[in-house]
Amino acid sequence: MRGILSVPLLAILLLATACTSAPKEAPGTAAPVAASEQLAAMAPDLWNKIFPHQFVLVIGNSEYRSLAPVEGAKEDAQTLALFLRREYGFTINVIANADASRIESVLELYARQLRIEDYFLLYYAGHSFIDPNTNECYWLPVDAGATDRTKWISSRRISELLRRMDVYHVLVLADGCYSGTRRRAAATPLDRRDAVWTMLDRPSHTVMTSGKIESDVGATATKASRFAAAIEAALARTHGAIEGYGLFESVRDDIGPGGVWPAEYGDIEPSSRRPGDFVFVRRQ
């Protein structure tokens, strides 16, 4: 990417449609094309629009300085990043065990370098906490303390950094929490060509969360959830393209209920008009 790949990393750079049977034709009429088939047919045109404009920042925090570890977060992040590069053509940037300064500085760099035609994906795995008094969510970098919140990064701060990016489409994948969003109630099915292009032509700043929330900050060792694996599995089953909400429905069904908070998909910045959505297109 225009200079961003030269940024030092703390680690080496290391969606879902089932086959559906076409309905039987009524006498004298043509059978409609199944959504999966139509998306597969559209994929080359979609690919030509978005490639090479997809960028993903993947943060996997496993080894904390003052808090208990989050087992598997770093490895899950690296595996997902490599999959996104190989199967979906993303330019990847992986940061393992990132401190607060590193997270903010890299997001600031993206804000300066991304352009309007780019698509930005942000994945986070590590400790996260919701303040029960304010309902504010915090991501905990590896230099965070259990009680000293100086290094904690709030969802409000992440949203502020994302708003600085002059891009139409942003999607946050958080293996944990994210506050300050408006939940989306239902998906817009990708069953018509104009629906897909409408999603791409309308801006979207959205968040998908796993619902993995901690009630006692970093007191005991935890394991990363199935979030990353569920995302990868859903995208691996996808033929053609899938929108963010469709990915969420598949991931939610995969990881199932659990945790203090439900898995959610929502808008960071609610729009007065019908918003678009992030669209994943399989490499052509």
Image (cartoon, rainbow, N blue to C red):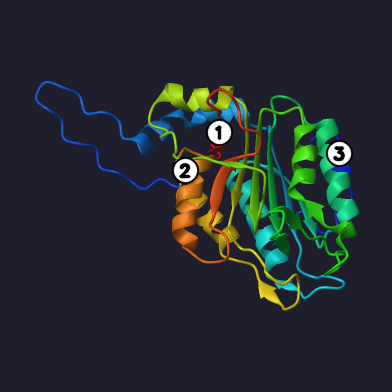
10 Å crowding of disc 3: few (<14), some (14-19), many (20+) = some
Q: Which amino acid does label 2 sit on?
A: Gly
For the point 46% across and 38% down, the residue is 240
Q: In this view, does 112 lie to the left or right of 209?
A: right
Q: Mark 3 points at which residue?
A: 109
| Residue 5 appears in the figure | yes
Q: In this view, does 202 lie to the left or right of 156?
A: left
Q: Quadrant of residue 134?
A: bottom right
Q: Which mark is residue 246?
A: 2
Q: In this view, does 51 lie above or below 87?
A: above
Q: What residue type is labelled 1?
A: Asp
Q: Which amino acid does label 3 sit on?
A: Leu
Q: Position of residue 154 (x, y in %)?
A: 78, 51
Image quadrant for the N terminus? top right
The residues tagged by marks 1 and 3 sit, at their Cα atoms, a distance apart of 24 Å
Q: Where is residue 248 in the image (x, y as percent from the top left)?
A: 51, 48
Mark 1 residue element: loop
For the point 59% across and 48% down, the residue is 208
Q: Residue 162 carries which label?
A: none
Front residue of 128/251: it is: 128
Q: Name the residue under label 1.
A: 277
The residues tagged by marks 2 and 3 sit, at their Cα atoms, a distance apart of 30 Å
